Amino acid sequence: MKSAVVVFPASNCDRDAAVALEQITGTKPVMVWHADSEVPDVDLIVLPGGFSYGDYLRCGAMAGQSNIMRAVKEKSEQGVKVLGICNGFQVLTETHMLPGVLMKNAHLKFVCRPQALEVIETQSVFTRKYQAGQRVVFPVAHGEGNYVADDETLDRLEGEGRVVFKYAPGENPNGSARDIAGILNEKRNVLGLMPHPERVCDPLLGGTDGKAMFEGLIEALG
Amino acid sequence: MKARVFVTLKNGVLDPQGKAIGHALGNLGFEGVGSVRQGKLIEIELSETDEAKAKAALKEMCEKLLANTVIEKYDIELKA
């Protein structure tokens, strides 16, 4: 599996993603700068966490207008898998590659902690190695992860099996609608999630629950 | 021309920041403060002299970047 990690000014999880990808796939991902207008030929593009462009205007808004996102959008339309983690999820909603929006956490506090999640949907290249209903712990670290969309959109996401991760019952860290932590696009090749699977791929870092996501991708993409 | 663009949350969208500001005003002793909602003001200078054209351009700016219309609405004020 060939992969690329997009680096925006003020991305800060790009290296975490690169280390996880290299450890699991055995190949270094290509690091792609935000001003580039082309993404190399890869199977997976990761939009990492961070505070791209200082979160100016709205988190993800400026990154959404960058050269590289036009190229990422084109690749995704051709079926290339795109994984947006944390700020990457915010960028995906700002480019309308995923519906809804991530608003300031309902309690206004930045949350940074290990977070229990429930795997809701396993019919995706990202979650095929998990069991439905499986409880996993990924770290969260965000101030704006409160997922908001209208009821019709939420019903559709749930009805179409596009809500892949939910915060464990009673443990919603940010006020997110229907406890949503991660969603797929209609074609199911784009996943955005607030928690950080790339940070739990090595026992030295406190857990390996995130590893199955990348192992599943390797299995599916070769 | 000079434009002022007001970007605010749509009615019905919860605004915890506005709520916190309201609480703080109460703590400062201001009485009778009801609902508080906050937003953004963006000032833009334009070389365009035709009002209709300027308005059309501003509307496009709002739709494409200045507002996220999933949760926000915008008002445009134009001065020659």
Image (cartoon, helix red, strand yellow):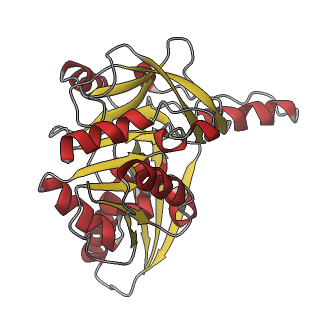
Give coordinates of residue A100: x percent, y percent.
34, 38
Residue found at the very far front of the displayed protein: A26
Give the farthest residue toward the right.
B29
Picture quarter with the C terminus of chain B: bottom left
Residue at 20 percent across and 67 percent down: it is A41
Residue at the outermost left position: A78
Please say if B49 is above or below B54: below
Instruction: Please give the count of numbered marks on the rendered protein.
Output: 0
* Residue closer to the observer: A130 or B12: A130
Residue A26: quadrant of the picture: bottom left
Q: Is residue B18 visible?
A: no
Tell me the quarter of the picture where residue A70 sits. Answer: bottom left
The answer to whether residue A98 is seen in the rendering is: yes
| Location of residue A19 in the rendering, given as x and y in whole percent from the top left corner | 50, 55
The quadrant holding residue A174 is: top right
Say whether residue A163 is left or right of residue B37.
left
Image location (x, y in percent) of residue B16: 61, 33
Q: Residue at x 41, y 45 (%)?
A: B72
Determine whether, in the image, residue A111 is placed left or right of residue A22: right
**Is A172 rendered above or below residue A62?**
above
Residue A210: x %, y % from top left: 45, 35
Picture residue at 34% right of the left edge, 24% below the top: A130
Q: Pick the residue in front: A57 or A167.
A: A167
Q: Residue at x 47, y 74 (%)?
A: B44
- In the rendered image, which quarter contains the N terminus of chain B? bottom left
